[in-house]
Structure formats: structure tokens, C-alpha cells
């Protein structure tokens, strides 16, 4: 169960990271095109698209951050359930003896 959940969440996180990389690239392309815009109308349109890309990038970063936190919490809960279900016990055995002698 832990492995399946971890794998699924990691897959989602990797997908979000790839989406963030794509959005960063898209934003940088839009900003370059904005610098080279000829008309003020074209500049305004590109500025709106760049702002939309920035907003979307911020939302994806927030989602990634929260997803990582959620993954940590769920994994901790899974580990705790496994620990509780296992009913682990510890046995102590003596491996050596200690002898104290009078040094006089």
C-alpha cells in the first residue's frame, strides 16, 4: 500500500514539475515576444498572455508545494498504520558479561 501510494504521488509530482517547466518556458517565450512587439496592441495582448502565464505558473507551484506536503503526511500515516498493525516487539538478550575485580 505504501509503495503504491508513493509511486502514484511521485508520478503526480513529476507531472506537475514538468508542467511547471513547460510554463516557465512558455512565459520566457512570451516575454521575449513582448520585447520585440511592434505595435502597442500586440504588446498589450502579449502582456495579458504573459500575466496569465505567470498566474498559472504560481498556481502550479502552490499546488506542487501542497502536494508534497500531502504526500509526506499520507506516508507518515501509512507508516504509522503499518507499525500499529505489525505489533512489533523487542527482545533483549545479553551478549556479554561484565566482571568487576578489585585491583588491589
Image: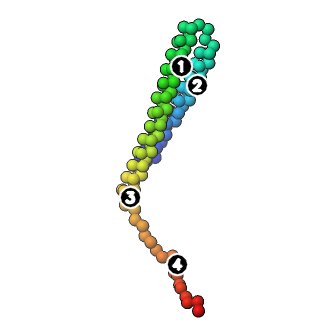
Check contact, mark 1 vs mark 3: CB within 8 A. Answer: no
Q: Is residue 26 above or below residue 98?
A: above
Expressed as whole percent of the image width and height from the top left, the position of residue 85 reads: 36, 56
Residue indicated by mark 4 = 96
Disc number lying in front (4 or 3):
4
For residue 94, the mark is: none
Disc number lying in front (1 or 2):
1
Label 3: which secondary element? helix
Nearer to us in this view, 12 or 1: 12
Q: Residues within 10 Å of mark 1 (few under 14, many from 20)?
A: many
Residue indicated by mark 1 = 50
Q: Identify the residue at horizontal 53%, vertical 33% (top origin).
A: 17
Check contact, mark 3 vs mark 2: CB within 8 A. Answer: no
Expressed as whole percent of the image width and height from the top left, the position of residue 40 reads: 57, 8
Q: Identify the residue at horizontal 56%, vertical 29% (top origin).
A: 21
How far is mark 3 from mark 2, CA to CA?
48 Å
Nearer to us in this view, 6 or 31: 31
Q: Residues within 10 Å of mark 2 (few under 14, many from 20)?
A: few
Disc number lying in front (1 or 3):
1
Amino acid at each position: 500500500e505504501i509503495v503504491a501510494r508513493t509511486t502514484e504521488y511521485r508520478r503526480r509530482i513529476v507531472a506537475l514539475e514538468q508542467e511547471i517547466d513547460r510554463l516557465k518556458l512558455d512565459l520566457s517565450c512570451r516575454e521575449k515576444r513582448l520585447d520585440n512587439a511592434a505595435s502597442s496592441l500586440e504588446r498589450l495582448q502579449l502582456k495579458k498572455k504573459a500575466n496569465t502565464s505567470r498566474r498559472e505558473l504560481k498556481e502550479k507551484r502552490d499546488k506542487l508545494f501542497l502536494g508534497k506536503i500531502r504526500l509526506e503526511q499520507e506516508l507518515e500515516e501509512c507508516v504509522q498504520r503499518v507499525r500499529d498493525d505489525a505489533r512489533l516487539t523487542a527482545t533483549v538478550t545479553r551478549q556479554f558479561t561484565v566482571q568487576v575485580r578489585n585491583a588491589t
